[in-house]
Every structure is written in C-alpha cells, then in structure tokens.
Image: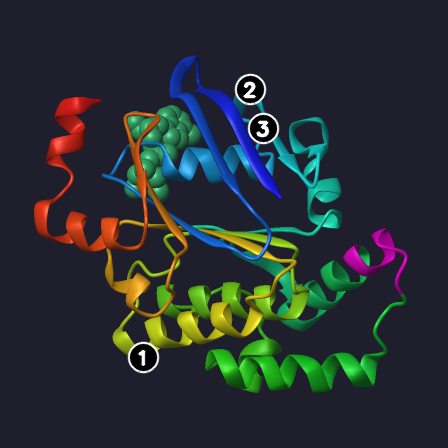
Amino acid sequence: MLKINDLHVAVGGAEILKGVSLEVPAGEVHAIMGPNGSGKSTLSHCIAGREEYEATSGAVTLDGDNLLELDPNERAAKGLFLSFQHPMEIPGVQTMNFIRTALNAQRKARGEEEVSAADFIKLIREKAKVVGLDNAKLKRQFNVGFSGGEKKRMEMLQMAMFEPRFAIMDETDSGLDIDALKMVGDVVNALRASDRGFLVITHYQRLLDYIKPDAVHVLADGRVVKSGGPELAQELEKSGYDQFIEAA
Ligand code: ADP
Ligand code: MG
Ligand code: MG
C-alpha cells in the first residue's frame, strides 16, 4: 500500500533523510520511533508535500501512484491524511466550515457525492464527542487559541471524519495526558481496517500500549537502522536510543 523506496530528502540544502525504505501493507499499523532530530517529521512533511522538504531521490508510492509527483491536494484526494506534530491555526476560518470543505473536496475527487449540511453536522458532532471536543469548539476559528491537547484532538477529529486510506500521525501523543492517549488509541483502533494503513510516529513507547503496531522501525540520523515486531518498542523503552545513535 504505502511504499517508501530509498528516499533522500534535503531541507535548506542539508540532506536530512539519507535513504529511507519501508513498506506498510494494507491493513497494517507501523510505528516509527527514533531520537529527536532523526528526521521523523521531515519524513512526514515530505510525504505531505511541504515545499521546503525536497525529495532529491527515491520514491513514495500509495497504491502504486508516486505521491512525490502530486500536489498536496491531490495527495489528500488519494486518501492520504497527515496529522502534524505542530498543527496549524487558520484565523478567520470556522472549524466546521474548514472540515466540511476539506471533506467534500476529497469526496468530489473520489467521484462521491457531497455530504448534506444536516448529515455533516450529525457526523461531526458524533465524532467530536469521541475525541472529547465540545460543540462550541467546532464554531470557533480553526485551532485559534486551542491548547496543544485540543489541537491534537482536532487532528483526530479530522482523521475520524475523513476516514483516510492511509494516515501518517506525527507524534500525536506528545503533550497528551493518559485519557487523551487512550482517545487517540480508540480513534485509530476504530479506523483499523483491511484496506487502510497507518504510520504512527512516536518518540515514546506508551502510545503503543493503546495502538498495537504490526511492525516498529527505528529511525536514526536519517536512516532506518532497525525494524522488528512490537517487542522492539518495549526494548527501546528499556535500552534507549543511544545504541542507534552510535551505530548511525
Ligand atoms: P524529528 O522529528 O525526528 O525530531 P526533524 O525531522 O524535525 O526530526 O528534524 C531532523 C533534522 O532536520 C534536524 O536536524 C532539524 O534541525 C532539521 N530540519 C527539519 N526541518 C527543518 C527546516 N524547516 N529547516 C531547517 N532544518 C530543518
Ligand atoms: Mg522532534
Ligand atoms: Mg518531529
């Protein structure tokens, strides 16, 4: 489903990713762990199509389509969803309108009908409850003045609404308390399906108590230095990342 093949990414002229390869088959959840500065966010920004993150060589395909040749909207239309470590604020745009516009744009790109206003409101209220956001938040400007935790809940609200084909979550767990972590786990687990995949980027093992990954990859200094099963996350929790920093 998602294939990353020998991806090199440069930011501001410096090579940050130095040949990353990994494959997430449909139906699976893979975790990427690694020390700060190893390039985890660079990977998600590049796959999202942020301009400053230039893929200098390699490929990223979703269902065989090279994402790197598509603009960010086309990537979203293919069913790619990214939850960023630092979600953006959009002053002047009401949360509900923003999500409805994005949802309908994706539906349209897939040749599906737009959701009616009534169905949309019903759906977003239901999902807002799941992620722990009250209805008043939906009427506010998108993410403006929201706390870090509320922004992460908003990311999970969008993921639940969009039902993406493939989701990449960049440190959604950072800054969250236990209840919010459990909520993130609930949203991911409810979406898990044989035709959907996830790449869950995290610095800590604790999120993986709620989201059981099929595989864990360790990123250090722009390379995948180790891959294994879920037990690798437990091992890292005990032994830390230093071993890989030395090796990298
Ligand atoms: P991680 O998410 O694993 O903590 P990042 O991908 O954020 O790592 O960063 C990897 C490296 O790339 C760091 O050295 C960081 O300073 C650099 N980097 C990331 N984004 C930028 C940017 N926009 N401009 C300059 N350097 C960047
Ligand atoms: Mg970091
Ligand atoms: Mg990061």
- Residue range highlighted in magenta: 106-112
Q: For the residues carrying marks 3 and 2, which lies nearer the camera in this image?
A: 2
Give the mark, 3 or 2, whose residue is nearer the N terminus: 3
Front position in the image: 172 or 13 = 172
Identify residue for label 1: 179
Helix, strand, or loop for circle 2? Answer: strand
Front position in the image: 148 or 174 = 174
Amino acid at circle 2: Gly
Q: Residues within 10 Å of mark 3 (few under 14, many from 20)?
A: few
Q: Quadrant of residue 141?
A: bottom right
Q: Is residue 42 magenta?
A: no
Q: Is residue 107 magenta?
A: yes
Separation (CA) of disc 2 from disc 1: 39 Å
Amino acid at circle 1: Asp
Q: Quadrant of residue 207?
A: bottom left
Separation (CA) of disc 3 from disc 2: 16 Å
Q: For the residues carrying marks 3 and 1, which lies nearer the camera in this image?
A: 1
Amino acid at circle 3: Glu
Identify residue for label 3: 51
> Residue drawn 48% across and 71% down?
189
| Looking at the image, residue 167 lies above or below residue 149 | above
